[in-house]
């Protein structure tokens, strides 16, 4: 028996259910329910033996939350299947009808890992699915009676998060992403938006360094250990809340599917308390980075006069992935109307003056108009100018020494004025919402991009 097989089988919960308590009342009814459950267990064990697959009692086996989270509740219900654990890219899935190869194949398409079906008793499986998917991801405040009693449609509505997300990317490091991220978060918070800044440039701890905030727990603890995202959030003196990154080799591009799904589930929960979330993403155009960038309501590309070509390359790579995502969503979801236009918001940092920034932006637009859009029939890319920031070495250095946002340390510096000016766009709640899209909220699109295999 291989090591993987042993680990897949470990703790499969193959115990019989406890005997019914001898309480007065409908003893016969209870005994017959117990009998029926036992019978289902015996049937499932017989199926397991016949098909030479494991047996799992989903009511007593340990179900790994990250594994269960790989499929949605309606898929679990429809296929009568519950992922139990993931070992070496093999997903053990408890199934009421493991002999149905179509159901097993349907599961394989989803998480794109190999599925090892296990036979499970039907009623126990249904109960386990209800229990697992009803459980909140993180222990939250006690639900009010009204929330508990809400009809499913009302519940879905209250769970819909209204947070708007802003992602900041660039092809090259050192162009000013982190300064832009910190100052946007600061300015938005000053204007009354409840703002969460997330250092998703894993491995660099860039925000921690710039603000001298090194909390006990950071994003890597969430991704690699079992921490709750809520426990990572720190309040800052600058009006916004922060989730820090840390130093290390782990990059956002290394995120596996289960981690992305878990990220989105937790983010959905924590984001309920915010109007805006700003993601400071790593340099480069790795697919996961682009997915975070494109899932967000607004994608900011930061570039400089020296790096304009790499800024253009970043916009082009993001557009290529944008088309791919839209086409795949269109193919997979009934009634989905794709977004046809991709409009990255361009920031030109370290310019001599604002005129230079605007001229460079125009050059970027011209290049996309000449080289990208003529080759497209359905989609198009239309960069939008968010602003430019003058090169101001002394002020930026002094700010970094003070471990504060530029806007806080030097609110009247030219660079601060330019940064403050950029926030207006994000304060208009209607902006960026495209009513043609199928998702009720743009967050759902974000979740779909990260938690489906596109
Ligand atoms: N407007 C600016 N003027 C002068 N120097 C700047 C400016 N913006 C950024 N820098 C310099 O570039 C460095 C990189 O900025 P940072 O925000 O960390 O970039 P990124 O997050 O893209 O790697 C900063 O430490 C600072 O020295
Ligand atoms: Mg950075």
Image (spheres, rainbow, N blue to C red):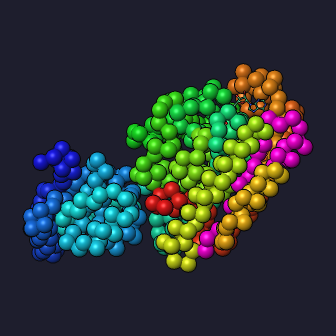
Instruction: Name the residue nearer the viewer: 181 or 1.
Output: 1
Q: Is residue 139 visible?
A: no
Q: Is residue 345 magenta?
A: yes
Residue 442 magenta-drawn? no
Residue depicted at 84% across the width and 43% down the height:
357
Residue 65, how many percent across, how many down? 36, 52
Q: Taking 274 as reference, is 16 above or below it?
A: below
Q: Where does the image place residue 311, in percent across and percent down from the top left?
A: 70, 45
Question: With respect to residue 154, does 167 lie above or below?
Answer: above
User: 423 left or right of 109?
Assistant: right
Q: Quadrant of residue 401?
A: top right
Camera-side residue of 400 and 327: 327
Q: Residue 102 location, x and y as percent? A: 28, 73
Residue displayed at 82% across by 46% down: 360
Query: Which residue lies at the image location 30% right of the left edge and 62% below the top edge?
Result: 82
437 over 67 or under it: above or below = below
């Amino acid at each position: 028996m291989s090591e993987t097989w042993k680990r897949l089988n470990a703790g499969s919960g193959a115990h019989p259910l406890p005997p019914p308590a001898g309480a007065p009342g409908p003893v016969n009814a209870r005994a017959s329910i117990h009998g029926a459950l036992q019978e289902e267990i015996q049937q499932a064990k017989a199926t397991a033996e016949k098909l030479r697959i494991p047996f799992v009692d989903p009511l007593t086996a340990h179900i790994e939350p990250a594994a269960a989270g790989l499929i949605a509740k309606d898929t679990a219900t429809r296929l009568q299947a519950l992922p139990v654990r993931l070992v070496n890219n093999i997903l053990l899935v408890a199934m009421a009808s493991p002999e149905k190869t179509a159901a097993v194949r349907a599961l394989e398409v989803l998480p794109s890992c190999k599925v090892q079906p296990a036979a499970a008793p039907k009623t126990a499986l249904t109960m386990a699915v209800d229990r697992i998917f009803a459980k909140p991801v993180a222990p939250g405040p006690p639900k009010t009676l009204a929330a508990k009693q809400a009809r499913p449609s009302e519940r879905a509505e209250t769970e819909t998060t209204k947070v708007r997300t802003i992602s900041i990317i660039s092809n090259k490091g050192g162009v000013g992403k982190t300064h832009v991220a910190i100052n946007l978060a600061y300015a938005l918070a000053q204007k009354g938006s409840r703002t969460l800044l997330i250092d998703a440039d894993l491995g660099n701890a860039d925000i921690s360094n710039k603000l001298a905030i090194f909390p006990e727990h950071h994003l890597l603890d969430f991704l690699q250990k079992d921490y709750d995202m809520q426990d990572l959030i720190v309040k800052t003196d600058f009006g916004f809340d922060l989730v820090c990154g840390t130093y290390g080799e782990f990059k956002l591009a290394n995120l596996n599917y289960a981690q992305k799904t878990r990220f989105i589930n937790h983010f959905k929960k924590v984001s309920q308390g915010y109007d805006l979330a700003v993601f400071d993403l790593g340099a480069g155009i790795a697919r996961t980075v682009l997915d975070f960038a494109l899932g967000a309501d607004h994608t900011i590309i930061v570039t400089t006069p020296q790096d304009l070509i790499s800024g253009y390359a970043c916009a082009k790579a993001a557009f290529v992935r944008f088309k791919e995502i839209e086409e795949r969503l269109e193919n997979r979801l009934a009634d989905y109307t794709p977004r046809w236009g991709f409009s990255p918001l361009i920031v030109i940092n370290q310019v001599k003056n604002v005129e230079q920034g605007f001229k460079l932006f125009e050059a970027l637009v011209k290049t996309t108009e000449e080289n990208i859009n003529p080759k497209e029939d359905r989609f198009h890319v239309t960069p939008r100018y968010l602003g430019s920031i003058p090169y101001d070495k002394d002020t930026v250095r002094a700010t970094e020494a003070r471990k504060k946002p530029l806007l806080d340390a030097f609110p009247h510096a030219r660079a601060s004025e330019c940064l403050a000016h950029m926030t207006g766009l994000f304060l208009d709640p209607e902006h960026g919402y495209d009513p043609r899209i199928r998702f009720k909220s743009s967050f759902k699109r974000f979740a779909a991009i990260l938690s489906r295999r596109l």
